[in-house]
Amino acid sequence: MKVGVIGCGAMGAGIAQVAAVAGHEVVVYDNQADALKKAEANLSATLRKLQEKGKLSDAAEVISRFHFSNSIHSFADCGLVIEAIIENLEIKKKIFSEVEKVVSDNCLLASNTSSLSITSIAAACQKTNRVIGLHFFNPAPLMALVEMVPAVQSDLHFIEEAKILMQKWGKIPVVTKDTPGFIVNRLARPFYGEAIRIFEEGIADMPTIDWAMTEIGGFRMGPFTLMDYIGHDVNYIVTETVFQSFFYDPRYKPSFSQKRLLEAGWLGRKSGRGFYNYTSGTEMPNPSKDQVLGTEIFERILAMLINEAVEALHLKIADEQDLDLAVTKGVNYPKGLLQWGKEWGWASVLSKLDYLYDQYHEDRYRASVRLRQLAKS
Ligand SMILES: NC(=O)c1ccc[n+]([C@@H]2O[C@H](COP(=O)([O-])OP(=O)(O)OC[C@H]3O[C@@H](n4cnc5c(N)ncnc54)[C@H](O)[C@@H]3O)[C@@H](O)[C@H]2O)c1
């Protein structure tokens, strides 16, 4: 089967690499000639490096499977086309409606969108039942998770077919409902939001919160280091989009601290400054390493994360196994959140949240009804 990729930026190029390494002929299309040239050069260099390291037997063979094109007509004989262009609903709808006229009736059309509704994208097509979400993580060749998202209109057998294909590509597919943030970008919100809240209230400074989450919690990166790494242009916008898409549920409320960083152009590591200052010669601030405070911070953030996962389970966003796989494989959490809840004890998680709710009387801290049921049982 020939695979088509629309857009060859960070994600499109990565997805094209995965498909070509898996043995497919891959048509890569972009409307910017420069982007095509850059992707062609980068993919060749990456694959040759993989061969040098002994991770790929024949780079030249894989490279020969790419066909770079500036015309969507090159998708004519593809069996699957994955879109990875700019995150804009109108532009995505337009390209889907154009591509569906070019491909055969059996061709599956997928979007790699992080935050848009697959149902809306499908609605732009005549044949809506073959449109699904295939959400890869960055960098696509290294991150195993793929969130598979049926639109309201999708035929579920396409999801089954895509699942088998993703497994053949060495990926770990999870199925999620077409709701904002799918699994990972929804479940991970409190990791950032609650950390910022703790900082804004002056309960602890950023290095102490980062230290609590890495040293006590076992996360690979603390929330502030991670947000600076992702970039506030990406991380803040995801938070704001999720908040708006959830009809302004206070659980997902963005923060002014992060919004101001974005406005200042302090985007994180890539611009030399974010929550922390990365300009050379600047010393990183030290955490307080107060165990009692650290444990309090870690448990507060973890309780919020677990509550989010339990609520997603309750609302059937995904099944238990997929919810846990999504965070361990998509954002490298040390444990699945539902597994963590079980180990910590549902009653303990609930009492943390109820304590916060008693303190604040904010809807943000409401416990999922499912968490109450689990705690009772
Ligand atoms: N970057 C990430 O971490 C990440 C992770 C998962 C999903 N995504 C999603 O993947 C998609 C692409 O993200 P990215 O980071 O690769 O973006 P990017 O800006 O790196 O690349 C986008 C590419 O699409 C091309 N493009 C834009 N409009 C086009 C059009 N109308 N027709 C053809 N080509 C067009 C651009 O020239 C560019 O090469 C977005 O929907 C994003 O939400 C991104």
Image (cartoon, rainbow, N blue to C red):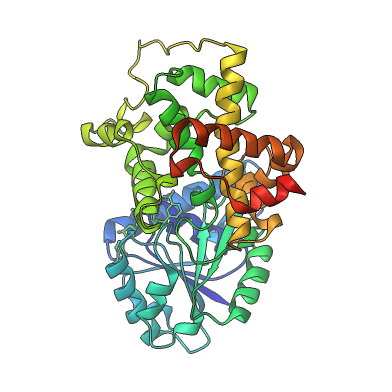
Residue 142 in sight: no
- Please identify the quarter of the rendering in which residue 30 is found: bottom left
On screen, residue 335 versus residue 44, left or right, reads: right
Near-viewer residue (353 or 273): 353
Identify which residue is drawn at 25% across, 33% down.
260
Residue 83 in sight: yes
Expressed as whole percent of the image width and height from the top left, the position of residue 27 reads 45, 70
Near-viewer residue (372 or 163): 372
On screen, residue 6 versus residue 145, left or right, reads: left
Q: Ligand 1, what quadrant?
A: bottom left
* Quadrant containing the N terminus in the rendered view: bottom right
Identify which residue is drawn at 46% across, 36% down.
192
Residue 232, above or below 172: above
Q: Residue furthest left?
A: 264
Residue 262, above or below 307: above
Identify which residue is drawn at 49% across, 81% down.
153
Identify which residue is drawn at 29% across, 34% down.
256
Residue 63, above or below 165: above
Expressed as whole percent of the image width and height from the top left, the position of residue 17 reads 52, 58
Residue 221, above or below 33: above
Q: How many marks?
A: 0
Expressed as whole percent of the image width and height from the top left, the position of residue 322 reads 66, 57
On screen, residue 270 versus residue 109, left or right, reads: left
Near-viewer residue (142 or 125): 125
Expressed as whole percent of the image width and height from the top left, the position of residue 303 reads 60, 37
Near-viewer residue (39 or 372): 372
